[in-house]
Image (cartoon, rainbow, N blue to C red):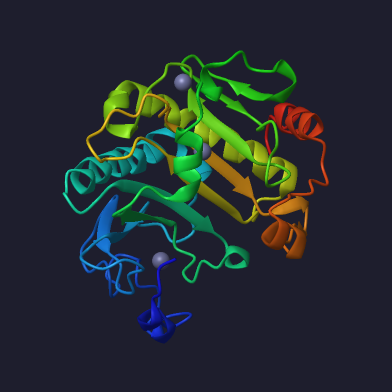
Amino acid sequence: MVVTPWRQARPNLPESGCPFCPGGLEAPRPYRVAWIPNRWPGLPDGRHEVILHSPDHDSSFPALGVAGTARVIELWSARTAELGARTDVSYVFVFENRGRAVGATIDHPHSQILAFNLVPPIAQAELSQATCDLCGDPDDRLIVARHPAWLARVPWAPSWPYEVLIFPRRHVADLPTAGPGLRAGLAAILVDCLSRVERLLGAAVPYMLWVHQRPTTGQDWPAAHLHLHLAPLLRRPGTIRHLAAAELGAGVFFDPVDPQAAAAQLKTATGPS
Ligand SMILES: [Zn+2]
Ligand SMILES: [Zn+2]
Ligand SMILES: [Zn+2]
């Protein structure tokens, strides 16, 4: 746990308009994508950053399209490389909380990076598995989308009813080693998956997105296979799925949607929204 009492003072919404719009408090100059230190950091020493996705306040990854999304992913990759090179950083955690329901205080499209000085427990648990789950034969019934170099599927045991795992077909460890070609493919499948989620659960669907990649400790991490978790907060349009006592106290997740049914719905959620 990280105790961050100074964050209690941060405003729910700044009073002087959006701080992330060009000309705003945090982004005084024009930009296409940008990274800034978090003014209310969860970790000290410049280890908490904000990534601005677009100057357009109302944008989103589907609205940015593949090229615009690829610019954001290029920045995630560059920040991963730079932060990961620090001796006080063992794990670069890239994530997005989208929507008020998931606690985003500012609507302007942005993601965040926490550069931990340890390998976080969930990443550690995934990395300690003997075989790479993502290199195994995928269950066809869980596949959401197939792209030339990437796959998207519902996990065997999702924590969120419409959770999707997005991963390269090759065993690639992290964003920097993926290279620009593979990262462009990630932009395409991410836009594809988010468009499906929006069609199925509504355009304003709140979601969480996070990247799991190789720790930056310098050791060999043979099980590290780059992937993204996309976790919409809803269990059906308009209805939030709450994590409550059973999940947090017992660590057992009760999934109201059959994973294969979730995959089938996402798979067929194509075409104009
Ligand atoms: Zn804005
Ligand atoms: Zn693998
Ligand atoms: Zn993971």
Q: Who's the residue at 38% across and 34% down the image?
A: 67
Q: Who's the residue at 77% across and 58% down the image?
A: 238
The image position of residue 83, as x and y in percent, is 22, 49
Instruction: Name the residue nearer the viewer: 213 or 25.
Output: 213
Residue 79 vs 106, above or below: the answer is above
The image position of residue 39, as x and y in percent, is 29, 73
Judge from the rendering whether residue 251 lies leftward or rightward of residue 107; answer left or right. Answer: right
Location of the C terminus by quadrant is: top right
Instruction: Name the residue nearer the viewer: 92 or 230.
Output: 92
Residue 90 vs 150, above or below: the answer is below
Residue 22 vs 61, above or below: the answer is below
Instruction: Name the residue nearer the viewer: 33 or 172.
Output: 172
The image position of residue 219, as x and y in percent, is 25, 33
Residue 213 falls in image quadrant: top left
* Residue 84 appears in the picture as rendered: yes
Residue 29 falls in image quadrant: bottom left
Location of the N terminus by quadrant is: bottom left
Instruction: Name the residue nearer the viewer: 271 or 52.
Output: 52
Judge from the rendering whether residue 173 lies leftward or rightward of residue 258; answer left or right. Answer: left
* Residue 64 appears in the picture as rendered: no
Judge from the rendering whether residue 49 lies leftward or rightward of residue 260; answer left or right. Answer: left
Residue 102 falls in image quadrant: bottom right
Q: Who's the residue at 26% across and 68% down the image?
A: 44
Query: What is the number of callouts on the image?
Result: 0
Judge from the rendering whether residue 25 lies leftward or rightward of residue 240; answer left or right. Answer: left
Q: Quadrant of ligand 1?
A: bottom left
Q: Who's the residue at 39% across and 82% down the image?
A: 5
